[in-house]
Image (tube, rainbow, N blue to C red):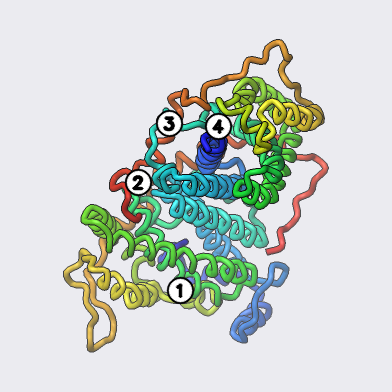
Amino acid sequence: MEHIKELLYKMADDLLVIGHRNSEWTGLGPILEEDIAFSSMAQDKIGHSQALFQILHQLGEPEPDTNAFMREAKQFHNAQFLELQNDDYDFSTIRHFLFDHADQLRFDNLANSSYEPLAKVARKIKGELKYHVFHADIWLNKLGNGNEESHARMQTALNNAWNYALGMFEKGDYEEQLIADTIFEGEQSLQNRWLAVITPIIEKANLKIPAEKDWEPVLGGRKGYHTENLDQLVNEMSEVFRIEPGVEW
Amino acid sequence: MYGNAYIDPNEKANAMIAGEDPIKLAEFEARIARGEKIEPKDWMPKEYRKQLIRMIEQHGHSEIIGALPEGTWITRAPGFKRKLALMAKVQDEVGHAQLLYSAAETLGKSREDMINDLITGKSKYSNVFNYPAYTWADACIIAWLIDAGAIINQVANAKGSYGPYCRALDRICTEESFHLKYGHDNVVTLATGTPTQRKMVQEALTRWWPPIMHFFGPSDKISSHTEILMRWKVKMASNDDMRQQFLNMYVPKIWDLGLVIPDANLKKNEETGKWDYTEPDWDEFKRVINGGGPCNAERLAVRRMAEEKGRWVRAALLRKDEKYVTPLA
């Protein structure tokens, strides 16, 4: 079962961390409607994460709250891309666009996974992700084609985000087994599909994907190597829970 | 969530209706007396419009500023259940601001102008949000008792005379009643929890009691100005009546949890049927409302920063060929 756990952990952590980051926009968005939108997506992401931690619990791992709130940053398996600070709305929107397309394609594939508990959850989740991607596409287009400043900001954010985004497709130790058991299509296949989907949308937004010769995926997140941003995030997230772990809050 | 709009008691009553057409004014007042709602395109006295804009705007501001002290606890909420619930709650509050700004816009002031007046300090918001939420327990006390106070105020105002505001309040009150349950559940969990949790919640209650008592505002000065606002159904209940209603509903619930309210004089007076309490420090209230509270500067600075940081996004959305449309509230 180690191969399934590896897959579940990286997904659950991606979703927990990006959900946490999305929630940081609450009260601070550029317009009220975007506060509300990011908060909705944050709630979905955290909920999806919880569903995956629940499956992990059924596989013998700690119960979801303990698992999510009591580990140290180095025990997290999320891609570094997701732990980076929200920065400005440009970077947040680009990350939202790049991650959510990958997330949607991943859950689309997992909806047909041979591991039924995950397939069942994926079939439910993928319906919600349609709206996340819809939101991301609209904003990429609006800001990419907005005015000179918004266009320049979005291009810069895309350039800065790109190699981190490629790090989402870092392979795990059990990659071949997951593919062989038809549990998951594998990161390479997912990345290819992702590129095919996002490229025309990025072009329509009048933006350019960095030249392929400059692609250098930022790896390590899946194996527990993180930036200091994750330490901060995990400390903050678990601050209250750790006052008295294991009791009801 | 929201307290009462701050109405300057020194404003002259006769100035309120000066220059109004007496026939139209009489018709307007008769409609309100019959229980009809006033709608955006109907005739209304200038002062009615002005007072309502001020009141709805302050209410909207309170919602977005109120999202700040609670919002800081979203990223610290202990466990999935609390994290999800708090996110949904604060999101509701921001949604209330959106509804309220739309209602105020029907009276002719744009959201942008309202937000500008907020960040320049020209327009007020509920005083209670100028106090800090030091611990998770503070956020729980806010969600229970401040929202409880807000419901009392908003249920009263929902019976007012201006249609768009009433309809917005009806929707808001439905959501607030969930917040109240959420807040109560949190406080019960802490109050019946470990000694550390009990200590946290008691300290939070002790800190928040004075702002809670301030929440409905000082006793109304009986003036013809207040009388007109009540006749126009802009102001629906006196501050003291709302405070009494709050005490009646929540003091027994607080005591049931074994928590101590930091007012030795607080008790129900059997003769009058009303609650006796130590008069809140109204000088402190005025000092805070005028900018001297522990968090006034921080709250406005955060809001100003959010406006500044988001300016380029709003600029990118502007289209020359689009026209301003009055929202349907």
Q: Which residue is mark 2?
A: A241
Query: Disc 4 vs disc 1: Cβ atoms closer than 8 Å?
Result: no
Query: Disc 1 vs disc 2: Cβ atoms closer than 8 Å?
Result: no
Q: Which residue is mark 4?
A: A82
- Which residue lies at the image location 44% right of the left edge and 43% below the top edge? A61
Residue A171 position, x and y percent, is: 60, 25
Residue B30 position, x and y percent, is: 63, 84
Badge 1, how many Cα within 10 Å: few under 14, some, many 20+? many
* First in sequence: mark 3 vs mark 4: 3
Mark 4, secondary structure of its residue: helix
* First in sequence: mark 2 vs mark 4: 4
Mark 1, secondary structure of its residue: helix
Judge whether residue A178 can be spotted in this image: yes
Chain for numbered disc 4: A
Q: In front: mark 1 or mark 2?
A: 2
- Which residue lies at the image location 23% right of the left edge and 87% below the top edge? B270
Query: Disc 3 vs disc 4: Cβ atoms closer than 8 Å?
Result: no
Q: Residue A86: which quarter of the image? A: top right
Check the image and report above or below for A28 versus B39.
Answer: above
- Which residue lies at the image location 21% right of the left edge and 73% below the top edge? B266
Chain for numbered disc 2: A
Check the image and report above or below for A145 versus B9.
Answer: above
Find the distance from the CA under tag 2 to the CA under tag 4: 22 Å
Residue A162 position, x and y percent, is: 65, 22
In front here: A124 or A59?
A: A59
Mark 2, secondary structure of its residue: helix
Discs 2, 4: same chain: yes
Q: In front: mark 3 or mark 1?
A: 3
Query: What is the three-letter code of the residue carrying label 1?
Result: Thr
